[in-house]
């Protein structure tokens, strides 16, 4: 077994991979160390305990997700392209689905998802106003679609179904 200490980033990346492949129960020091071919000492060098590691994973995802929303606010592409790109980025990220499963039993993960979803909903409603659609229920329906599609077609994200929804939004404008 390799006794080299891995960086915190390597542990975080490995955690997202483990979460996606095996669920939250895989986010423990020993199985993670085994999977990475190192010792638990490397894990505990960077993280006080497993809950601290979990918090670091959630913070990393949360930060990236909010950064993505902020970046998309400055995008100058037409709103339909922005909407498709936004949706595809969520559908293409398997970590999203895994986090939602984890959030069912972890209030900290759920709170983080709720905060990100609130920002995403604000972004969606901002985009929809560019189509002259001001009913906030449209934004909620789109966000619900992005959350739900991976649940019903877990093997491959359903861009076609999401794109059909975007086409409907464009037709309503």
Image (cartoon, helix red, strand yellow):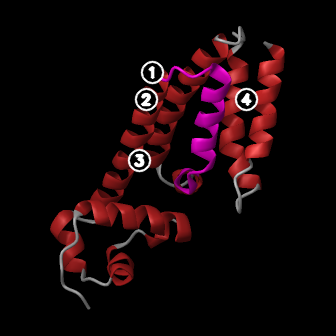
Report which residue position mark 2 lands on. 71
Q: Position of residue 45 (x, y in %)?
A: 16, 69
Report which residue position mark 3 lands on. 61
Q: Are marks 1 and 4 in contact (CB under 8 Å)?
A: no
Which residue sits at x=41%, y=47%? 61
Pointer 1 or 4: first along the chain = 1
Which residue sits at x=52%, y=20%? 76
Report which residue position mark 1 lands on. 74
Which is nearer the eye, 5 or 74? 74
Any part of residue 144 in sight? yes
Q: Position of residue 113 (x, y in %)?
A: 50, 41
Q: Give residue 5's quadrant in the image.
A: bottom left
Pointer 4 or 3: first along the chain = 3
In the image, taking residue 42 as reference, residue 15 lies left or right, namely right
Pointer 3 or 1: first along the chain = 3
Position of the C terminus, as image quadrant, is top right
* 51 over 164 or under it: above or below: below
Which residue sits at x=34%, y=61%? 12
Report which residue position mark 4 lands on. 141
Which of the two marks, 2 or 3, is nearer to us in this view? Answer: 2
User: What is the secondary structure assignment of the residue under circle 3?
Assistant: helix
In the image, taking residue 54 as reference, residue 75 lies left or right, namely right
Q: Are marks 1 and 2 in contact (CB under 8 Å)?
A: yes
Q: Which residues are magenta?
A: 75-96
In the image, taking residue 89 as reference, residue 157 lies left or right, namely right
Pointer 4 or 2: first along the chain = 2
Position of the N terminus, as image quadrant, is bottom left
User: What is the secondary structure assignment of the residue under circle 2?
Assistant: helix
Q: Residues within 10 Å of mark 4 (few under 14, many from 20)?
A: few
Q: Residues within 10 Å of mark 3 (few under 14, many from 20)?
A: many
Main SS class of the magenta portion in the image = helix
Pointer 2 or 3: first along the chain = 3
């Amino acid at each position: 077994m390799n006794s080299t200490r891995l960086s915190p980033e390597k542990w975080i990346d490995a955690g997202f991979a483990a979460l996606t492949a095996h669920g939250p129960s895989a986010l423990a020091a020993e199985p993670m160390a085994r999977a990475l071919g190192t010792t638990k000492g490397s894990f505990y060098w960077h993280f006080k305990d497993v809950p601290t590691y979990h918090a670091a994973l959630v913070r990393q995802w949360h930060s990236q997700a909010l950064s993505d929303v902020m970046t998309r606010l400055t995008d100058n592409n037409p709103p339909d392209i922005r909407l498709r790109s936004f949706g595809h980025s969520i559908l293409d990220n398997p970590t999203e689905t895994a986090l939602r499963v984890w959030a069912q039993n972890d209030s900290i993960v759920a709170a983080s998802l709720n905060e990100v979803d609130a920002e995403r909903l604000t972004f969606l409603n901002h985009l929809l106003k560019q189509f002259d659609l001001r009913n906030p229920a449209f934004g909620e329906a789109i966000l619900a679609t992005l959350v739900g599609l991976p649940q019903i077609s877990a093997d491959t994200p359903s861009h076609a179904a999401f794109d059909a929804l975007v086409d409907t939004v464009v037709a309503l404008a």
